[in-house]
Image (cartoon, helix red, strand yellow):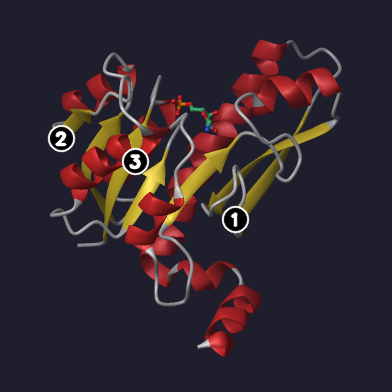
Amino acid sequence: MGIKLAVMVSGRGSNLKAIIEAVKAGNLDATIECVISNEPDAPALEIARQNKITAVAVAHKGLSKIEHENKILDEIKDLGIDYVVLAGYMRIISANFLKHFQDKLGYYKVINIHPSLLPAFPGRAGYEDAYYYGVKVAGVTIHLVDEEVDHGPILAQQPFPRFPGDTLESFKERGLSVEHALYPAVLQQIATKGIPSFCPVYKRTHAETK
Ligand code: GRF
């Protein structure tokens, strides 16, 4: 049966597609219960529909953050979601939303992928910022979301090289192919071994405070 996921998106949906393909190929023991986009025209919604996954647009325009997030919570609250997966969701998640997904160990079951080796280059343009900074080694981070932006316990990081002849496009393409392999693999580890398997120290810290 696996873990039940709600995937939140805002745009293109290439990570969503990689996750769907991993499920279909039997490499990810999960079901995607719904895909939610704050952008009604996001191509990611169409990818979900093509794969017969419930696709819901919850536009944020004209709503406060709390109103918008409460509408999203209404959409997913009865689905038995184990983890919320952010896949190019371009809005900051509030503490109000996170508290609905708090695990007994204290972390939030909300996962994000970020296109840099955090804590370097947080923000909306991780690849661009790293490329124009001139890094020789770039990377991708998958982390649990907390109350700060692009912050929270790191589950996985994978570096990739920047080659001298890279254009921004070739650099991003290399990064995206890392993302598309890493996200399904991390989700599969969560499905089979749980979050604490990524970091025994993190598990102990939280267990000791209980
Ligand atoms: C990815 O680079 C991801 O790391 C970042 O936003 C981008 C989303 O791309 N958070 P896509 O919509 O999955 O194609």
- Residue 49 coordinates in the image, percent (x, y): 17, 25
1 or 2: mark nearer the eye = 1
The answer to whether residue 37 of the structure is visible from this angle is: yes
Dots 2 and 3: beta carbons under 8 Å?
Answer: no
Horizontal arrangement in the rendering, residue 135 relative to residue 179 (left or right): right
Total numbered circles: 3
Mark sitting earlier along the chain (1/3): 3
Task: Name which residue type carries label 2.
Answer: Thr
Image mark for residue 202 = none
- Residue 150 coordinates in the image, percent (x, y): 60, 43
Residue drawn at the location 30% of the way across and 34% of the way down = 68
- Give the residue at mark 3: 66
- Residue 51 coordinates in the image, percent (x, y): 19, 30
1 or 3: mark nearer the eye = 3
Task: Name which residue type carries label 1.
Answer: Gly
Mark sitting earlier along the chain (1/2): 2
- Give the residue at mark 2: 54
Is the CB–ligand 1 distance for label 3 below 8 Å?
A: no
Residue at disc 3, secondary structure: helix
Dots 1 and 2: beta carbons under 8 Å?
Answer: no
- Give the residue at mark 1: 152
Q: Is residue 70 above or below residue 56?
A: below
Mark sitting earlier along the chain (2/3): 2
Quadrant of residue 117 within the rendered picture: top right
